Image: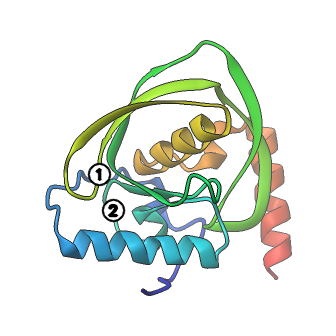
Amino acid sequence: MTVLPLVKYPDPRLSQPCDAVTTFDDELSRFAHDLLDTMRAAPGVGITAAHVGVLQRLVVLELSAEMGPRFYVNPELLDASAQIMRHMEGSVSMPGATEEVERPRRIRFRYQDLKGEAHEEEAQDFYAICMQHEIDQLDGIFWLKRLSRLKRDRVIRKWEKGKS
């Protein structure tokens, strides 16, 4: 497998919606496993194809050793609870930058696996937060857009200062 180069904030590709995956073949599977290697090397718990500059709807999550790596093709939210939770978020495309984001505590979503088979799932707490974060990225919503302008500006200033 291969560790791919990450797209870094403020690359405009991080603000572009991704296209649906339509071909489910060995190439998709290889790419998904390269994304997994890239995420682990970053390090991170989630990554999308957009994080390496490929504007396709593909997500990889590895939230725990028990859960193992999971691959989600063309994921979309179906429903979200009214109950909100806060969690620290960041991005492999903006290493070291984090801030608290509010999101629904529970979601229902659908996706396809690497073979193209459709699935529907419910997620809550950390799993729900991560899935929403990555689906946002696929929709062209970089996590900073979920912050107030004041918090967003502060995170960007701090991150830019740390880069030099």
The reply to whether residue 94 is visible in this rendering is yes
Query: Percent from the top left, x then y, of residue 38?
Result: 53, 77
Q: Residue at x 62, y 38 (%)?
A: 129
- Badge 1 amino acid: Asp
Residue annotated with mark 2: 55
Q: In the rendered picture of this protein, how many numbered marks are placed on residues?
A: 2
- Badge 2 amino acid: Leu
Are the residues at dot 1 and dot 2 in contact (C-beta closer than 8 Å)?
Answer: no
| Residue 56 to residue 105: above or below | below
| Badge number at residue 157 | none
Query: Percent from the top left, x then y, of residue 46?
Result: 56, 58
Residue annotated with mark 1: 113
Q: Residue at x 16, y 68 (%)?
A: 25
Q: Looking at this view, is 150 or 112 the one in front?
A: 112
User: SS class of the residue under badge 1?
Assistant: loop
Q: Residues within 10 Å of mark 1 (few under 14, many from 20)?
A: some
Q: Looking at this view, is 140 or 12 the one in front?
A: 140
The reply to whether residue 7 is visible in this rendering is no
